[in-house]
Image (cartoon, helix red, strand yellow):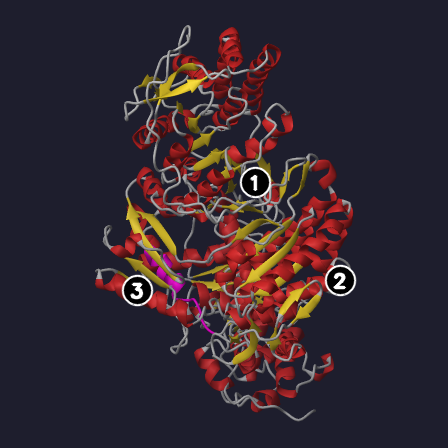
Amino acid sequence: MLAHQRGTELDLSWISKIQVNQPAVLRRAEQIQARRPVKKEWQAAWLLKAVTFIDLTTLSGDDTSSNIQRLCYKAKYPIREDLLKALNMHDKGITTAAVCVYPARVCDAVKALKAAGCDIPVASVATGFPAGQTHLKTRLEEIRLAVEDGASEVDVVINRTLVLTGQWEGSDFIKTSTGKETVNATFPVAIVMLRAIRDFFWKTGNKVGFKPAGGIRSAKDSLAWLSLIKEELGDEWLKPELFRIGASTLLADIERQIYHHVTGRYAAYHDLPMS
Amino acid sequence: MAATRTGSRACEIFTTLEYGPVPESHACALAWLDTQDRHLGHYVNGRWLKPEHRSSVPCQDPITGENLASCLQAQTEDVAGAVEAARTSLENWSTQPGAFRAQHLTRLAKMIQKHQRLLWTLESLVTGRAIREVRDRDVPLAQQLLQHHAVQAHTQEEALAGWEPLGVIGLILPPTFCFLEMMWRICPALAVGCTVVVLVPPASPTPLLVAQLAGELGQFPGILNVISGPASLGPVLASQPGVQKVAFCGAIEGGLRLLIQESVWDETMRRLQARMGRLRGGRGLDGAVDMGARGAAARDLAQRYVREAQSQGAQVFQAGSMPPDSPFFPASLISDLPPASPCTQAEVPWPLVVASPFRTAKEALAVANWTPRGGSASVWSERLGQALELAYGLQMGTVWINAHGLRDPAVPTGGCKESGSSWHGGPDGLYEYLRPSGTPTCLPYLSENLNYDTFGLAVPSTLPAGPETGLSPAPPYGLFVGGRFQAPGARSSRPIRDSQGNLHGYVAEGGAKDIRGAVEAAHQAAPGWVGQSPGARAALLWALAAALQRRESTLVSRLERHGVELKVAKAEVELSVRRLRAWGARVQTQGCTLQVAGLKGPVLRLQEPLGVLAIVCPEEWPLLAFVSLLAPALAHGNTVVLVPSGACPIPALEVCQDMATLLPGGLVNVVTGDRDHLTRCLALHQDIQALWYFGSAQGSQFVEWASAGNLKPVWVNRGCPRAWDQDAEGAGPELGLRAARTKALWLPMGD
């Protein structure tokens, strides 16, 4: 991941000056989804690009080493080889951006990835995920342990008590939500976050990454997210260092769309490998 | 596995992540043109008409220049035929119950829904506009318009009791946006029971398609007739017997003027440029394009303006992806234009934005209102108080706060100043096509012999006219201007005779200079009067009513001198008093809030004063008509210049004595003199916001002709007498509608 933010003096007056015109944000959100369709080869290429932004995620209470292993294998081979070949993209090293698991499963993931012979980073959610309502001491310890186990990225749940009382924290990456809320990554919220990222960049020259998570299930959704980033932040943000999509089922739909693009037919579920 | 289709470019796109073309198939539009053998005529009375020996105009794809079809140009007899069809179907259509017309409109809405792809591809193909604009906005809005007006038709008997449809409506459309602009106008017209003849510019097939869809509903084929022809047919349409009203719509979409406060100038320009840099232009039928093209003429216009601006020292920012070849022009942001340069004064063409800084909100308001146009504007601010202050102050038909370009069938859309004074949508849009029941249907009378250059030019000289036979006590001599009686500029007088032919007295002979002075006085009084609360206005009207009551005996005797019977004279005074009271009471119930589907927050429908209103009173009912016209004008916050009855101005001057003591100076100004001459002076005055004329047919014609110069709203009677003693005609809601201007103020909300 990126070198750490050089950081700036926290200036709360920036935050107090921020104004959000909600109706306008809603309109913009609608427009972006309607006005930037991509089709045919463009769609295939964009979808493959989207694959490289995915934090392939499993965050279930019943995760075990076996499904983690399967997930890691899918991260390494996200799209069926023959489909990639048909697109002449088989030698581009297309993998997901990372796998994302609970801290207790980091060990399994690191082991599985090593076995598959690849250097995809392991991301761990941490700090009392998803509520973050645990003691600072245990939260810090959790991060330390995950890193010890080999996690190279940590998704930290911020202390929302502090946020709601106006005490902010800084970060390299901001995420729409944990993905476990009733409402997760929505376009209007994303627009506001992206504008904040842009303003911060204009003010300080620091680039903060962005990760929408939760509810992004269809290939079409992922395309809309890519064009949202392209429109609001520009192409320079369209790389795994600055943009991730947290998703578990998205990859399957993307693969189905690629299958359709290549063959002209819609795939049955069993035509494509499980993740 | 099936045979594979290979994507050769995928690799390259994977790296650049560029956008690709998303062509919308326009096969159905072409197929529709094929049904007409690529040769479009007129759609009249449910049938295609292709008369012989007419010239035709090619309809071209504005981007490729490809010939799509040829369109016949109508001639006078084609116009006459269409009007005849509309007249014939009027009887049947206007007498149907509203609920029945509602059903028919609903069916048309469904018809449009069924063929929406054809509509949007055809419109985008021939206009070059971006498909998303047409598909996502225009076509759904067209359906909403039909549905909204179907509801209005359904409740017409109840909600619009006392009004009846005007008759056959002529509609003249501009080359761009003619489909949607047509819908805004035909929906209310058809809903209330009018029938329509639309004259579209050549090579505009979409209105023809709409007419065909309406025609194919089977019943009432003649209610919507569309003919295509040159603009020179406009006067022909207007002068057809039977056409009761002509609605004219000029070119719609221009560029924008942007006023940015100095303190946020840099930040705003930066964001604006960042956003404009991402605009994509291209073929309208591409689904991923923000801006289409408007053809070579529009591009040349924009290019000329930009070059001119650059030569005058302006900065021009152009960005965004735009195909380099004709006929595209990128959205351009122009700044640093010197304030006095010709470009600053000229109209900004599409797709340009001219940005200039301002210091205070007050300055911004002054700059924004310093234009002959008055269509729409938006105010962007997080300070609600200031935003509202600006929104109320802007002389515009529509103001959006922190939003732009929203439209809804329930919200009246219109303008003021040279943007015209008619309304579409909302309650106001309906009244455009209605008249109070029972008012005489005066057919437009156009005299060929009227000489506009000499009408009312000369004032006959007046000489002493025999012994004065007693005015006791005489009202002060002079013109009532600025709150006091003043000697006329010409220093001459005109004799007033009583019903016996004896000299009753002399009144001042007003002229051009006096009109100028009166208008000036009215303008000075305007801000004070507008600022008064409705309650305060009502109180003044009631005070005037009381004063009139006290003066009853004098007024009655003045009227008697002019041959009015005692009983009738008493009734006239009494009714005048009642009128003042009634309008005083109505002042307090103006404006309302509208609800719009899909919008969080209210839309305010404000009733604003027109400004300085000039009224030429009728000869008859010298007191009652004077008061009946004055009262609604004052109630709605206007300041007034009146010309009283020519034969009998004395009662009006009597009332002026009370106004001198009760009303602020300049609020009401009364100028006596030669009516034709004063009418001429008023009609040719550019700084009067509206003119009402009750007099001869010739005078009406002159007033309409002269006022077309700055499109000020006029109300003329074409020589038809009006029953001022009847409430419907003397105090009906029509007067209130004429005396005020609507403004729609959009207040979207959100946390």
Depth-wise, is mark 2 or mark 3 nearer the camera? Answer: 2
Nearer the observer, B706 or B65: B706
Disc 1 residue crowd, few under 14, some 14–19, many 20+, Cα 10 Å: some
Going from the N terminus, do you reach mark 3 or mark 1 first?
A: 3
The residue located at (39%, 58%) in the rendering is B255
Circle 1/circle 2 CB separation < 8 Å: no
* Chain ID of residue with mark 2: B
Say which quadrant the N terminus of chain A sits in: bottom left
- Residue type at mark 3 is Val
Q: CA distance from mark 1 to mark 2?
A: 36 Å
Is residue A174 placed above or below B505 in the rendered structure? below
Give me the chain letter of mark 3.
B
Judging from the image, what secondary structure is the residue with disc 2 in? loop
Asked if residue B444 is positioned above or below residue B21 in the image, the reply reads: above
Using the image, name the chain to which the residue with label 1 belongs.
Answer: B
Residue B344 in view, yes or no: yes
Which one is in front, B672 or A256? B672
Query: Which image quarter is the C terminus of chain A in?
Result: bottom right
Tell me residue A164's x, y (percent). Answer: 50, 44
Residue identifier under label 3: B306
Task: State which quadrant residue B354 falls in.
Answer: bottom left
Q: Are marks 3 and 1 in contact (CB under 8 Å)?
A: no
Identify the residue shown where x is 55% and y is 63%. Answer: B200
| Residue, disc 1 | B602
Answer whether residue A199 is magenta in the image. no
